[in-house]
Image: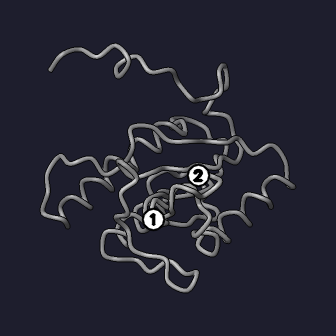
Amino acid sequence: MKYDLDFNHRQSIRLNGYDYLTSGAYFITICTHDRECLFGDIVNETMGFNTVGDIARSHWQQLSQHHSNIIIDESVVMPNHLHGMIILESSMGSKKSISEIIRGFKTFSAKAINKERGLRGVPVWQRNYYDRIIRDELELDRVRQYIINNPRNWDADKNNQTQSSTHPDL
């Protein structure tokens, strides 16, 4: 495979100079590879999970069992992405950064999802993820509402590739 400078030297989308070991709340969005709708469908403004959607949701919800210094707050698995809030608490001793936690989630959930699909080594998740550092209680409440309302707003979601190309957010 030929070395691709653009592919191998992408610019980070993390906040420059920010220590992602810092205690606080983080809003995370992880999209599926090629934004493929893998996890189920939105029916009557409610997410209906298929088997691999249940696997993704279960792996996300179990993160706090593997990382004693995090709390999983609101989250939602959508047909082709996941929104979730992680609250990173301070702790003594070894602690993982948000990027290490997400990398582990993506690795282990992808293996379980591909096992269920009878596939091996097929990408499940996009290479990166989006994060937003939540700065105050007002923003925390806004993000929680956004996550809770995400299935209801699926028809207008930019990640909904079933939209026509005339949708204003595309």
Q: Nearer the viewer, residue 2 or 97?
A: 2
| Chosen colour scheme | one colour
Farthest residue to the front: give it. 166
Q: Which residue is mark 1?
A: 162
Q: Secondary structure at mark 1?
A: loop
Disc 2 target residue: 70
Give the x, y percent position of residue 110: 29, 53
> Residue sitting at 63 percent across and 52 percent down?
169
Q: Amino acid at mark 2?
A: Ile
Classify residue 16 by image quadrant. top right
- Residue 37 versus residue 43 in the image, above or below: above
Residue at the image position 65 percent from the left and 46 percent from the top: 26
Secondary structure under the numbered disc 2 in the rendered image: strand
Where is residue 118 drawn, in percent x and y?
12, 63
Q: Quadrant of residue 80?
A: bottom left
Counting residues from the start of the chain, the first of labels 2 and 1 encountered is: 2
Eye-nearest disc, 2 or 1: 1
Q: Quadrant of the N terminus?
A: top left
The structure residue drawn at horizontal position 17% and vertical position 61%, both measured from the top left corner, is 115
